[in-house]
Amino acid sequence: MSDAGGGPQAARAREQEGSFEFVEGPTGDLTFLARAPTLEGLFTAAAEAFLAVTLEDASGLEARERRELALEEPDLELLLLRFVNELVFLRDASELLLRPERINVTQDGVARLGATLAGERIDRQRHSLRSDVKAATAHALRVAEVADGWEARLTLDV
Amino acid sequence: MDTKLLERKSECEWWIQPTGGMRVPAVLYATESLIRDMDEKVREQITNVAMLPGIVKAAYAMPDAHWGYGFPIGGVAAMDVESGVISPGGIGFDINCGMRLVTTNLDWPEVQPHLRELVDALAERVPAGVGSRGFLRLSDEDFEDLLRQGAGWAVREGFGTPDDLAHTEAGGCFSGADPECVSEHARERGLRQVGTLGSGNHYLEIQVAHAEGVHEAGLARAFGIQRPEQVMVMFHCGSRGFGHQVATDYLHDFLRAMPTKFGLPVIDRELACAPFGSREGRDYYAAMCCAANMSFANRQVILHRIREVFSDVFGRSPEELGIRCIYDVAHNTAKLEEHEVAGRRRRLLVHRKGATRAFPPGHPELPPEYRETGQPVIVGGSMETGSYLLAGIASGAVSFFSTAHGSGRTMSRTKARKLVRGRELQDRMAERGILVRTASLRGLAEEAGLAYKDVEEVAAATELAGLSRRVAHLVPVGNVKG
């Protein structure tokens, strides 16, 4: 379980937990590689990658609104795919940009995620918007346990 | 791409003969230089497409093909309706992403003094970028009608004319749409997005048809390019979040059902598919038709906004300004079509992902005024290099009457952003006479001309390959970028 809220301390906690970088992928899209010591950190890093594509600067996003999320999928890869697609859905349907404030990921026959997402509504005066992620895709999708934790590769259709 | 791995059949036709799990050959249409510059991944992906159950004749890659997910962008595959599959990855997430080309009776010297005003007004009236919302406030019932009726809904609501529908592929409506097959998530995403451009490579452009850019004067006249330096409007957009959610939902369902219910191997998760005759396959087709209709309605409403803007700026009615839809064509769909295969007429489900239908002269689905010319085909180039108007021809039967849809990327967005700064690009384009309004400077950098193939070469390759013929090159002067 992790606590990754909106303030500076929480942002530092997120940095300690996971990281992401954009790598080469299908030419029209954006592919990122996320790494973290824990599954929770990995999913949080994936959410940060989504926000980094969406906003010029995601660090100023404040925890003004919250949504609960519970997902279940046959494996961790489909769970990550579904999780990022839920963030995309909430952006379009409710104009909300959210990141995990509390998250729990388990794998026991099936993969499950429980999270409290926190963030705020899109405000064009305050938020400098960047690219419109249309979907997370299953292209070369990978979630793997590595020596120092977990690694994921995900391609965003933009 | 390594040409040694391909069998060259003619100047613009390269084959991969069936090996391993391939059920049919793969055929790539491109000049040698386009093939050499093409991603190696295109070969891998078109080979995977050739393995899909029920594929007929061959898997095809168009001259603008590039690395996509599942199918390459620029991929075409026709499936037998009895034994074949339907694949969201063969259609693209942005279902019925497409192009619409609109003509005016204005010439460039008349428009030039008003360009800034026009571009600013278009940017305001046609929202673009992240989270953009349209001006329409639709009830759930309105939205269901829109999903069933497509562009016809928009025209009935006062956003266009019957002539617009006559100049839209399939009359602006895919029959077979069933809103019952669409998730609540998709409805919630799409409800307020009608009339919006989106982002990425979507754009709305004011263009000029210079006399020297006209390849076939007779065809150009027949399509409505009738005076020197005539001003046109071209735009590129699709079904927005709605289509993406439909694709996401069904891709997820298909992945779960493939190994268990259908006993199908998952070659690549983005090639997830279901037998077309299965409940899942039919449901996806009905939902895809809804998304295609949402996209046709979206482009119809955007045309209405363009008419409003031009009318306001020039103080004349859209009729007086001769604002007329030349054609609206989809490039991300699966369609039920009849084609001749080995001397026999067959009903096929033709997947075109980043590929355009290009019916030849005489085809019964074309409106009367295009029966002798063949179908207008709109190929969107990069915002720096311009676009092309092509026409369908009889020899296009080789690829189920399919041709290119754009320039095709040569470079990833990540790499383009490292090489180009958005502000500098915007300034450079202004110096060259192209005024750009963008929702995101980083997004602009990702769409720089250097990230794309040469549209001239792509258009010429379609002609050399016998897929379509060149009619006119259109030059951008003002661009609203998503």
Image (spheres, coloured by chain):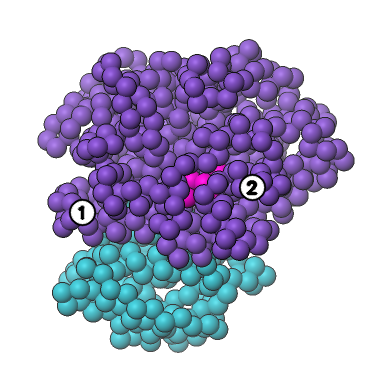
Label 2: element kind: helix
**Left or right position of B464 against B446:** left
Residue pictured at 22% horizontal, 38% vertical: B83
Residues A146 and B371: in front is B371
Residue pictured at 74% horizontal, 42% vertical: B307
Question: Does B135 appear above or below B310?
Answer: below
Q: Quadrant of the N terminus of chain A?
A: bottom left
Say the numbered circle drawn on residue B258.
1
How far across and down, in percent of the image, does residue B348 sit? 32, 32
Question: Does A103 appear above or below B140?
Answer: below
Q: Amino acid at mark 1?
A: Met
Residue pictured at 29% horizontal, 52% vertical: B279
**Distance from Cα at disc 2 to Cα at disc 1:** 38 Å
Residues A25 and A133: in front is A133
Residues B330 and B468: in front is B330
How far across and down, in percent of the image, does residue B438 sit? 63, 51
Q: Residue furthest right?
A: B315
Question: What are the residue bounds of the magenta stretch?
Answer: B290-296
> Is the magenta region chiefly helix, strand or loop?
helix
**Image quadrant assignment for residue B167:** top right
Question: Does B215 appear above or below B259?
Answer: above
Colour of chain B as rendered: purple
**Image quadrant assignment for residue A32:** bottom left
Residue at the spot of label 2: B154
Between marks 2 and 1 in the image, the one whose residue lies nearer the viewer? 2
Q: Amino acid at mark 2?
A: Ala
- Chain bearing mark 1: B
Give the mark, 2 or 1, whose residue is nearer the N terminus: 2
Chain corresponding to cyan in the figure: A
**Image quadrant assignment for residue A80:** bottom left
Are the residues flagged by discs 2 and 1 in contact, CB closer than 8 Å?
no
User: Badge 1 local density, few (<14 within 10 Å), some, or many (20+)?
Assistant: some
